[in-house]
Image (spheres, grey):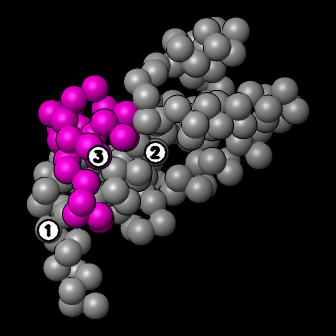
Amino acid sequence: MITDKEGSSGSGSTQTLEEAAAAYQSGTGTQRRRLVEAILGYVHSRYAHPFSLDDLAFDMKRNPSYLSALFRQTTGMSFQQYREEIRLRNAREMLCDPRHTVAEVARASGYASPDAFRHAFKAREGRSPTAWRASQSVQRSIA
């Protein structure tokens, strides 16, 4: 299960995003580390826009299968899992501000449509973005 700093969990691995991002350090070779650092930077700088592993590979002039295997080997999660987790982390932060609509959050987090965002969010959090937002409001008012 993947968890973020706030303790939210998803399916797949049992490491935090920070652990996954840091895991590349255990890899061997400067070239491999630089590639993984570049992949992490790419995801963080472009998560708000639609992009695929093929786009990344094209931009880096590398084979998509090689980049995928390297990323999984050194971080313990797939490129797609990491990209999704970064997008959902941004979405959770934005949902804490009631001025943002779900559609705005979806767009700013890189989802093609609000429906695609709702589906991904519910699969990860177990409830809709609206229900999650409401539960966060209640938690903040109790604290």
The label shown at residue 105 is: 3
How many angstroms separate mark 3 from mark 2 (CA)? Answer: 13 Å
Q: Residues within 10 Å of mark 1 (few under 14, many from 20)?
A: some
In front of the other: label 1 or label 2?
1
Q: Position of residue 29 (x, y in %)?
A: 86, 32
Counting the numbered discs, the total is 3
Q: For mark 3, does the 10 Å Cα neighbourhood hold few (<14), some (14 to 19), or many (20 or more) residues?
A: many
Residue type of the residue flagged with mark 3 = Val
Q: Nearer the viewer, mark 3 or mark 2?
A: 3
Which of pointers 1 and 3 lies earlier in the amino acid sequence? 3
Name the residue tied to disc 2.
86
Q: Secondary structure at mark 2?
A: helix
Viewer-nearest residue: 35 or 139: 139
The residue that mark 1 highlights is: 134
Q: Residue at x 63, y 47 (%)?
A: 21
73 with respect to 91 (left or right): right
Q: Which residues are magenta?
A: 96-120
Q: Which three-letter amino acid code belongs to the residue tagged 2?
A: Ile
Q: Is residue 100 magenta?
A: yes
**Image position of 71 with respect to 61: above or below:** below
Asked if residue 120 shows in the view, the reply is no
Q: Is residue 41 magenta?
A: no
Query: If you read the primary sequence from the N terminus, does the residue marked by circle 3 or circle 2 appear first?
Result: 2
Q: Position of residue 89 (x, y in %)?
A: 40, 52
Furthest toward the right, the residue is: 30
Q: Secondary structure at mark 1?
A: helix
Task: From the image, state whether disc 1 or disc 3 is nearer to you.
Answer: 3
Is residue 25 toward the left or the right of residue 56 in the image? right
Report the residue at 11% width, 60% height from top: 131
Name the residue type under label 1.
Ala
